[in-house]
């Protein structure tokens, strides 16, 4: 209060420092303050006293911290001693007391957060800072669309890569940088960067990640697995062949084993089968190895696979029968002897048989289709050349026999006629083939229909060959300029024919599933497509004539 009163003393009297009232002498001023501003003065004095005390404490602590850290290096802080303490003596050779303890300051570290922060700041200081943006009192975040005021509330950080200032949210990223502030994913230093630099770094948008070619390893493992499977298949096939020979009468155990599936205890059939492969003992297996079902005397009996000898149950999901090759005696009824095998052995043995049968029973339409594809490829290669020659001759006044384009067009036309003729023969042959199944018949019909449509849509340009000695016009009077219209109509016809085929398939499926309402709607669509196709074909015929 004395300092405030001395400041308020004027030349003509004393003024109240709170309300400004003039007092003739100091006694009256003190009385005025006690009577009118007693409570306010006490409150203000308490506030001023608290601020002064706090200021002195903060200044003293800051001075001590500054003086202590100034004598240390970050490298020393980043290296904790073995006893969990940090030696904060500025002089590494400081004297020790008689009891051996250091006379300096030792700080116990419960956590390494402060040490790691200091180490990170020391590491980031290696990266170049000459490109950093200069700080001002009105800095805002450099991220597009942010523009937050930088300070205590939003933070203020430099991006170590681009050097611009960003807020806390847009600078909370890290990436490895070299000493010259460039991206170095392998040998760089982890530094704080902005969101833009983090996203624009090389490899950020690589969504496939690291890929390795495992083809050779897969082929090597597959080869090993195939070798094991082939050895197992050969072993089982040899056993099956031995059983066939034994059942045919070539065994030395008995003269003839009856071709029945009944196993009579003590009969020669079991001896014959066990002579080929030893059977597993019943007491060694308590459950089926395929379905893990426990065996029982009545409900789940034990059976033996005649090829591998394992004990299996009688369920159809675990065992099956396979026919063996056996010669029949003349004059006897044909029988097919069968033996009981597990499903694994059956799958291995029948795999090769099925493959051989599939190769032997390939439908003729599949065998003839490569020829259709070959002729179609040849036509697609030569027909554009022929059409280009026709367009070139159509622009001339007259066409002579000696013209090079005319001679080349004649040769190409003859070649295309041969190709079209071969395709027509193949289509007729495929259509006349006999089929054993409805699927094969439908396949033959679709292939022949596709060949017919292809011929109809691509042979019309062969009629445009001009006459010799006349203007470059087609021999049948058709203008070559209509070729583009015919080609467009042809493409539309092809699209509608594909739609017609798909809708027809849907119609057959709906009829088979007895969906009468859907079948009625699909039938109307099929009829509409048929009419549209016929209309387009008539337009093509009109342009050709």
Image: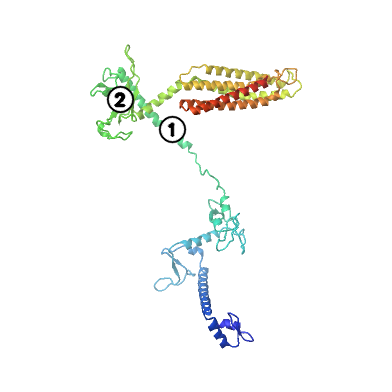
Residue 301 coordinates in the image, percent (x, y): 27, 30
Q: Is residue 47 left or right of residue 256?
A: right
Q: Is residue 381 above or below residue 206?
A: above
Where is residue 405, by image quadrant?
A: top right
Mark 1–mark 2 distance (CA, rounded to whole Å): 29 Å
Mark 1 lies on residue:
223
Q: Is residue 299 left or right of residue 39?
A: left
The residue nearer to you, when weighing 93 against 54, is 54
Mark 1: few/some/many CA within 10 Å (<14, 14-19, 20+):
few
Q: Is residue 233 visible?
A: no
Q: Residue furthest left?
A: 266
Q: Is residue 321 visible?
A: yes
Q: Secondary structure at mark 1?
A: helix
Instruction: Quadrant for the N terminus, please.
Output: bottom right
The residue nearer to you, when weighing 33 against 215, is 33
Q: Secondary structure at mark 2?
A: helix
Q: Is residue 491 left or right of residue 519?
A: right
Residue occupying image coordinates x 64% and y 27%: 488
Q: Which mark is residue 249?
A: none
The residue nearer to you, when weighing 175 against 528, is 528
Mark 2 lies on residue:
276
Answer whether labels 1 and 2 touch (C-beta < 8 Å): no
Residue 195 coordinates in the image, percent (x, y): 56, 53
């Amino acid at each position: 209060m004395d300092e405030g009163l001395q400041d308020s003393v004027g030349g003509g009297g004393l003024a109240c420092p709170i309300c400004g009232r003039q007092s003739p002498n100091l006694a009256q001023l003190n009385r005025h303050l006690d009577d009118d501003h007693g409570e306010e003065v006490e409150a203000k004095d308490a506030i001023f006293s608290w601020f002064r005390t706090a200021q002195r404490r903060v200044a003293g602590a800051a001075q001590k911290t500054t003086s202590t850290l100034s004598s240390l290096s970050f490298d020393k802080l980043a290296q904790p001693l073995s006893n969990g303490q940090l030696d904060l003596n500025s002089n590494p050779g400081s004297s020790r007391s008689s009891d051996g303890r250091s006379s300096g300051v030792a700080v116990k570290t419960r956590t390494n957060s402060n040490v790691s922060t200091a180490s990170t700041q020391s590491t980031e200081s290696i990266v170049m800072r000459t490109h950093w943006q200069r700080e001002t009192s009105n800095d805002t975040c450099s991220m597009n669309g942010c523009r937050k005021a930088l300070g205590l509330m939003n933070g203020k950080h430099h991006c170590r890569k681009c050097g611009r200032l960003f807020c806390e949210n847009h600078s909370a990223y890290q990436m490895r940088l070299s000493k010259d502030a460039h991206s170095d994913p392998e040998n760089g230093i982890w530094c704080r960067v902005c969101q833009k630099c983090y996203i624009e770094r090389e490899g950020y948008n690589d969504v496939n990640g690291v890929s390795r070619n495992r083809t050779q390893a897969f082929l090597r493992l597959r080869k090993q697995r195939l070798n094991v499977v082939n050895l197992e298949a050969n072993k089982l096939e040899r056993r099956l062949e031995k059983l066939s020979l034994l059942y045919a009468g070539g065994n030395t155990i008995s003269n003839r084993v009856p071709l029945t599936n009944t196993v009579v205890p003590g009969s020669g059939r079991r001896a014959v089968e066990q002579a080929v492969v030893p059977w597993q003992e019943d007491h060694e297996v308590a459950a089926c190895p395929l379905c893990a079902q426990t065996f029982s005397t009545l409900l789940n009996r034990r059976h033996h696979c005649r090829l591998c000898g394992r004990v299996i149950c009688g369920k159809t999901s675990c065992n099956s029968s396979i026919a063996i090759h056996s010669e029949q005696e003349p004059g006897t009824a044909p029988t097919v002897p069968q033996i009981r095998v597990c499903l694994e052995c059956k799958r291995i043995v029948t795999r090769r048989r099925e493959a051989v049968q599939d190769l032997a029973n390939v439908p003729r339409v599949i065998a003839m289709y490569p020829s259709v594809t070959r002729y179609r490829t040849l036509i697609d290669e030569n027909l554009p050349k022929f059409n280009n020659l026709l367009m070139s001759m159509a622009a001339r006044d007259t066409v002579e026999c000696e013209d090079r384009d005319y001679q080349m067009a004649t040769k190409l036309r003859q070649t295309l006629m041969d190709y079209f003729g071969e395709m027509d023969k193949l289509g007729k042959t495929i259509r006349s083939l006999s089929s054993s199944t409805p699927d094969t018949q439908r396949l033959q019909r679709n292939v022949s229909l596709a060949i017919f449509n292809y011929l109809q849509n691509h042979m019309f340009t062969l009629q445009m060959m001009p006459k010799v000695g006349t203007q470059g016009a087609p021999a049948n009077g058709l203008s070559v300029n209509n070729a583009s219209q015919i080609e467009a109509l042809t493409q539309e016809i092809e699209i509608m024919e594909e739609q017609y085929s798909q809708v027809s398939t849907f119609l057959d499926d709906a009829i088979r599933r007895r969906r009468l309402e859907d079948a009625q709607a699909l039938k109307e669509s099929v009829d509409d497509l048929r009419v549209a196709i016929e209309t387009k074909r008539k337009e093509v015929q009109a342009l050709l004539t």
